[in-house]
Image (spheres, coloured by chain):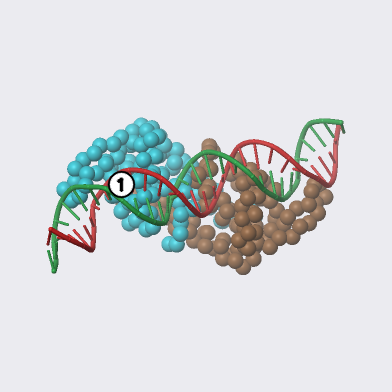
Chain colours: A brown, B cyan, C green, D red
Amino acid sequence: MENLTEMLKGILEGCVLEIISRKETYGYEIVKKLNSLGFEDVVEGTVYTILLRLEKNKLVEIQKKPSEIGPPRKFYTLNNAGRNQLQTFWRKWDFIASKMNELKENQDGI
Amino acid sequence: MENLTEMLKGILEGCVLEIISRKETYGYEIVKKLNSLGFEDVVEGTVYTILLRLEKNKLVEIQKKPSEIGPPRKFYTLNNAGRNQLQTFWRKWDFIASKMNELKENQDGI
DNA sequence: ACATCTATATAGTAATACTAAGTAGATGGT
DNA sequence: ACCATCTACTTAGTATTACTATATAGATGT
């Protein structure tokens, strides 16, 4: 799918939160997961800036661990604030998605 | 719904295109429609900048008409490029919405 | 020695929604 | 006549976000 950049604004961070909530993971792996989900053009620079933002906003806990196949990894887990943020994200997403659906389906005007 | 700003990035322009596609309309009316749709915090400055962008990108035709209850209105209609853009918008939206749903529902990881 | 894959970091850019302030026409109340 | 209110459009500046581009570095294979 071509150039989703602008439409990913505001939702990519939520995707990252959701992925971290599933299991402890690290940046490089998150990029691969987003790519295999279908967001093929999401690159490392984008995800690392999101992760640094999450850290700055104290939504995650971090543990550095060595890797056997490359440089050390920074593993992320959500803390309570992060879980709250994720819940808020999905509430907003569901709201917007329902409104968009309303807009798209309502052929009688709005 | 609180602060949807960041999540509206990339989709608000599509909403405006969709609203215009339904019937010839003008900025102030578009704001009211977005508000009644549920995007209550969308204000005039936001919509007018979008409309000027649509005009700059040659996606709309414009006709100025007098109003009986206030200053003259700028009425917008989509041209062919605008209709194409709207179609592209919905394709992207559907793609993202389906992926978000996949992400949310897939409890077995991604 | 070099390429490749893994892994993180960061300065700078572009795009977008929002803030805030202004201008102006029409109507109604005082 | 004056002011508030609703209607209606404009625009300079700001904040946030995803992306670009580049850099650094560990491990493996040729």
For image coordinates 70% across by 55% down, the residue present is A25
Q: Quadrant of the N terminus of chain B?
A: bottom left
Q: Quadrant of residue B42?
A: bottom left
Q: Position of residue C21 (x, y in %)?
A: 35, 54
D10 vs B108, left or right, is left
Query: In front: B91, or A29?
Result: A29
Q: Position of residue A60 (x, y in %)?
A: 65, 61
B16 vs B107, left or right, is left
Query: In front: B64, or C12?
Result: C12
The answer to whether any part of residue A24 appears in the image is no
Does residue C9 sit above or below C29 in this rendering? above
For image coordinates 18% across by 51% down, the residue present is B69
B1 vs A73, left or right, is left
Q: Position of residue D4 (x, y in %)?
A: 23, 63
The answer to whether any part of residue A14 appears in the image is yes
Does residue B101 sit above or below A82 in this rendering? above
**Residue at which label 1 appears:** B27
Q: Position of residue A39 (x, y in %)?
A: 58, 44
- Please tell me how many numbered marks the rendered image carries: 1
Query: In front: C3, or A25?
Result: C3
Q: Amino acid at mark 1?
A: Gly
For image coordinates 39% across by 39% down, the residue present is B53
For image coordinates 53% across by 47% down, the residue present is A8
Query: In front: A25, or A81?
Result: A81
Q: Determine crowd level at label 1: few under 14, some 14-19, many 20+ residues with C-alpha closer than 10 A.
A: many
Pointer 1 chain: B
Q: SS of the residue at dot 1?
A: helix
